[in-house]
Amino acid sequence: MRSMAFVSLLCFAGFAVAEDKEFQGYVTDDMCAAEHMMEGMNDKECADECVKMGAVYALFVPDDAKMYLADDPKKLEPHAGENVVVTGTVSADGKSIQVTSIRKVEASR
């Protein structure tokens, strides 16, 4: 009887689905994160230049003071420098988001 309960538990665990969450933050790059370092450039210009030099687009969430990579950084590219809400699932290691949607927040920082 125990083995049957254990097998049932394993089957149920196999079907567990991670839930999408919303993260509000700024599309930046993984080199600069919260503070853009290139003088004379706005946030978008700085992020774009950093990506040209080898960085990748990322989401900085000020409420958590945390930066997340995207499963596909190209999804973030059109929103560089923008305040956005990203919907997606956080990876097991907590470092990246599998992005399902992105929407711009009208208020600027």
Image: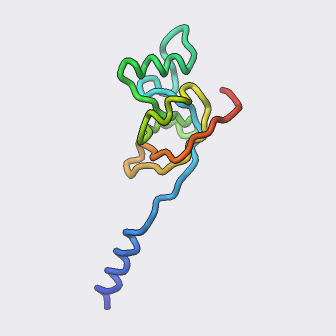
What percent of the width, then of the height, locates residue 72? 42, 39
Q: Is residue 39 above or below residue 82?
A: above
Residue 61, quarter of the rendered image:
top right
Q: Residue furthest right?
A: 107
Q: Residue at x 55, y 44 (%)?
A: 101
Q: Is residue 2 above or below residue 54?
A: below
The residue drawn where x is 70% and y is 32% is 106
**Picture residue at 54% right of the left edge, 12% below the top:** 41
Pinpoint residue 79: horizontal percent, then vertical percent. Answer: 56, 30
User: With 100 as the anchor, is 106 left or right in this view?
Assistant: right
Locate residue 3, reporting x and y percent. Answer: 28, 85
Q: Residue furthest bottom?
A: 1
Who's the residue at 45% across and 33% down the image? Answer: 74
Q: Is residue 45 toward the left or the right of residue 6 in the image?
A: right
Question: What is the quadrant of the N terminus in the image?
Answer: bottom left
Q: Quadrant of residue 102?
A: top right
